[in-house]
Image (spheres, grey):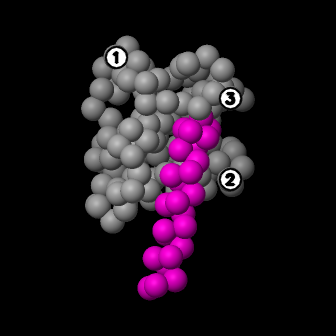
Amino acid sequence: MNGRTNKPFTFKDAENFARKNPEFKNVGPKKILENSGAIIRKLDVVYQTGVFVSNIKTLLVLVKAYATKEYTKVPKKTMLSICFALFYFFSPVDAIPDNIPGVGYIDDMAVIQRVLKAANDDISEFKQWEEEQTKAA
């Protein structure tokens, strides 16, 4: 991706990766929603902490709220980076193949973590909005 895993994953990183991997070219909220089942199935396979699984589920809910126009306060570049990360997570195109025991999901987790870091403020605002919606219901 862009070298160090502690560096936030940017929209520019996603654009560069998409140029090299055509299957990533039209990634967006609609494509993520169409493939949300595959993302959930992969979550069932990934042996990670509940926080990692919870973060991916939050990203999926955010994408759905954005796609249905319930919540549109997320900048477009941030949303596209989130969609790219989710697509990368379930895509067979990986830097490290998923079928390598013990290390196959490291690249997936790194991409998700980098997006979470880059979009932290936007995700926090979404979670706050989501809580407000729950209280209002």
Q: Give me the disc on residue 19.
A: 1
For residue 26, side relative to residue 5 (left or right)? left
Q: Give the range drawn in magenta.
A: 112-137
Circle on res. 53: none
Residue at the (52%, 60%) spot, across then down: 125
Q: Where is residue 45 in the image (x, y as percent from the top left)?
A: 59, 44
In the rendered image, which residue does mark 3 sit on?
6
Q: Residues within 10 Å of mark 2 (few under 14, many from 20)?
A: few
In this view, the mark in front (3 or 1): 3
Say what secondary structure mark 1 lies in: helix
Name the mark nearer the viewer: 3 or 2. Answer: 3
Residue ID at (68%, 44%)? 47
Of callouts 3 and 1, the N-terminal one: 3
Q: Residue furthest top?
A: 20
How packed mark 1 is, by other alpha carbons closer than 10 Å (few <14, some 14-19, many 20 or more), is few
Q: In the picture shown, does residue 105 fall above or below 21?
A: below
Residue 67 lies, with reference to residue 103, above or below; the image says below
- Which residue is label 2 attached to? 51
Residue 22 lies in quadrant: top left
Instruction: Please state which amino acid type lies under the numbered disc 3.
Output: Asn
